[in-house]
Image (cartoon, rainbow, N blue to C red):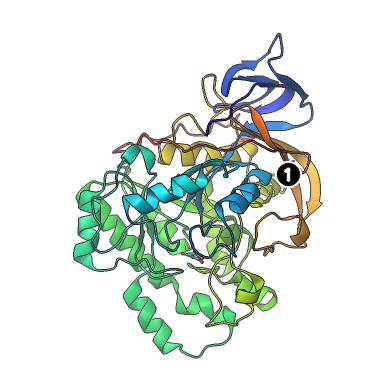
Amino acid sequence: MQTTGSITFRGAELVLPDRVAEGDLAIEDGRIVAIGRVERAIGEEIDARGLTLMPGVIDPQVHFREPGPVHKEDLETGSKAAAAGGVTAFLEMPNTNPPTTTPAALQDKFDRAAGRCRSHYGFFYGATPDNAGTVPDPTGVPGIKVFMGSSTGTLLVDDQDALEAQFAGASVPIVVHAEDETRLRARKAQFAGATDPAMHPVIRDVECALIATKRAVDLARRHGKRLHVLHLSTAEETDFLRGLPPEGLITTETLPQYLWLDASHYARLGTRLQMNPPVRDARHGEALWAGLLDGTIACIATDHAPHTLDEKALGFGKAPSGMPGVELSLPLMLHAVAEGRCSIRHVVRWMCEAPAHIYGIVGKGRLVVGGDGDVTLVDRKAQRTVRADDLHTRAGWSPFEGWTLTGWPTMTVLGGRPVYRDGAHVDGVFGSPLRFAHHPKLPPLPALSATAAQ
Ligand code: DOR
C-alpha cells in the first residue's frame, strides 16, 4: 500500500550527504524535489527553525514476532514503535513461528505487513540446512539470515556442507548471527546450573563469537559472496575485521546496547540485560566506538528483540534472550552527539546512509533531490527521561528506563506524509515493501569530510 504526500520544511538544519547546512526541503508526491531555498511551499509548510531534518532511520535488524509469539510484539506494534522513534524502514528477522524459510512464509509476511506497518519494511529469508538457493526474488529480499549458533527460535545452520551450500547459492547478502554452536554447547554444559545473569558473557564468551565470525568471513571470501556480520559485540572481532583486505564483501554493524551498557549493568538489570551475543565488559564498548569512528563498523541496528517482563522474570537459564530497542536507538545516538562522542553526520551515516548502501535499498537513506521523502525531524536539544509508559513496543519496557537523553525525534515522515507527530501516530499512513538493488561487491561510501563532522 503506497501512501504519499507533499510537505515543505523551512529553515531546518539539514543533514545532507556531504555537509550539514541550514535550509528548506520540499517533498512532492512522496519524492524530495528541492533542497536549499524553496520559493513556494509545496503541501503543508513546517517551520523547522531550530530543528534538524535528517533521512528517516533504517533499522536493519529487528524481531517483530509475527507470525508467532505476538503477545511480545507484532508487525503493527513493532512498526508503530519504529515510527515513534524516527525509524522509517526496518529489516525484520526470520526467527518467527513459522520461520521465514520458504517463499510462501515470506509472502505471508508481506501479506500481513500491507496496510498495517507504519514504517517501510523488508524481511530476511532464514537459512535452513536444506533450503540453499531458494530465495524467490532477490529484489524483494535484503539478505539470508544464518544462525551459526542457536538463539531464540529454531533456526540453526552449523554444518560445514550446509554453510558452503548457502554461500554458494546466495543471490543476496548473507547475514550471520556469529556464535559458534559447538563451543556454545560445551560452555553451556560446563556452566549448567548457573543462576547469575552476569555469567551470560562468560558462557557465550568472546571466543564463541570470534570463531564464528572468522568462519563466516572465510566462507564469504572463498565463495566471493557478500557477508554482513550482525550485532558485533567484541573488541577481538572488530580488530579481526579491521585487518581484512578491502574487497567490498564484508560489512558489520553494532548496537546501541553494546555502546551504552556493559557487564556492570547485570547487577541492576539482571536477565533484562541478557541477549545474544551478550553485553560484555566495558572495553568492548570502547572498541566498538573506535570501530564505528574509523569505519570498520558500517552501521547501527537495534536487534529489537521483545520479550515480556514475565518471561524475563523466569530467571537466568529460563529467561529468553533479547531486549526491545527500535524506539530508542535514535535518541540514544543523538545523546551520543550531545555528549560529544560523535557528530550528527556520523549518526546519519551509521543509521541511514550505510544501511541503505549495504542492502542496496532503493531510494532511501539520503536527503537528495529525487530520493524518497522519508525524513525525520529531530530536536537535538530536547531532554526527556525514558519511561515505560511512553513506549509503544508491546513488550512495554526498556533497559534504558530512567535515563535522561538529549535529542529526540519530533516528526517522522513516510513518503511526504507524517506518520508520527506531536507524540501520536497519524491514522491511515502506512509503509510499503522495500526494494533492493544488491551490489555483488560493495563500493566504499565517501569518507566523512572534516567539515561535515559537526
Ligand atoms: O538476544 C537475542 N534475541 N539474540 C538473537 O539472536 C535473537 C533475539 C530474539 O529473537 O529474541
94, 354: nearer the viewer: 94
| Image point (29%, 68%), residue name | 158
**24 left or right, relative to 294:** right
Confirm or reject: label 1 Cβ below 8 Å from ligand 1.
no
Q: Is residue 251 visible?
A: no
Looking at numbered disc 1 in the image, what kind of residue is underneath it? Trp
Residue found 40% across the figure and 67% down from its top? 209
> In the figure, is residue 5 to the left or right of 145?
right
In this orientation, does residue 30 appear? yes
Number of dots carrying numbers: 1
Q: Is residue 361 above or below residue 131?
A: above
Who's the residue at 29% across and 44% down the image?
136
Where is mark 1, residue-wise?
408
Residue 146 sits above or below residue 298 on the image: below
Snapshot quadrant of residue 71: bottom right
For this rendering, which residue is in front, 181 or 314?
A: 314
Where is residue 89? Give x, y as percent.
54, 41
Outermost residue, top side: 39
Q: In which image quadrant can residue 212 be found?
A: bottom left
Q: Position of residue 184 (x, y in %)?
A: 38, 77
Number of other residues with Cα within 10 Å of mark 1, as a class: few under 14, some 14 to 19, many 20 or more: many
Residue closest to the eye, 272 or 289: 272
In the rendered image, the vertical position of residue 255 relative to residue 204, given as above or below: above
Left/right of residue 292 with respect to residue 237 in the rendered view: right
Identity of the residue furthest to the bottom in this view: 193
Local SS, label 1:
strand
Residue 220 percent coordinates (x, y): 27, 52
x%, y% of residue 5? 63, 24
Residue shown at 38% from the left, 50% from the top: 106
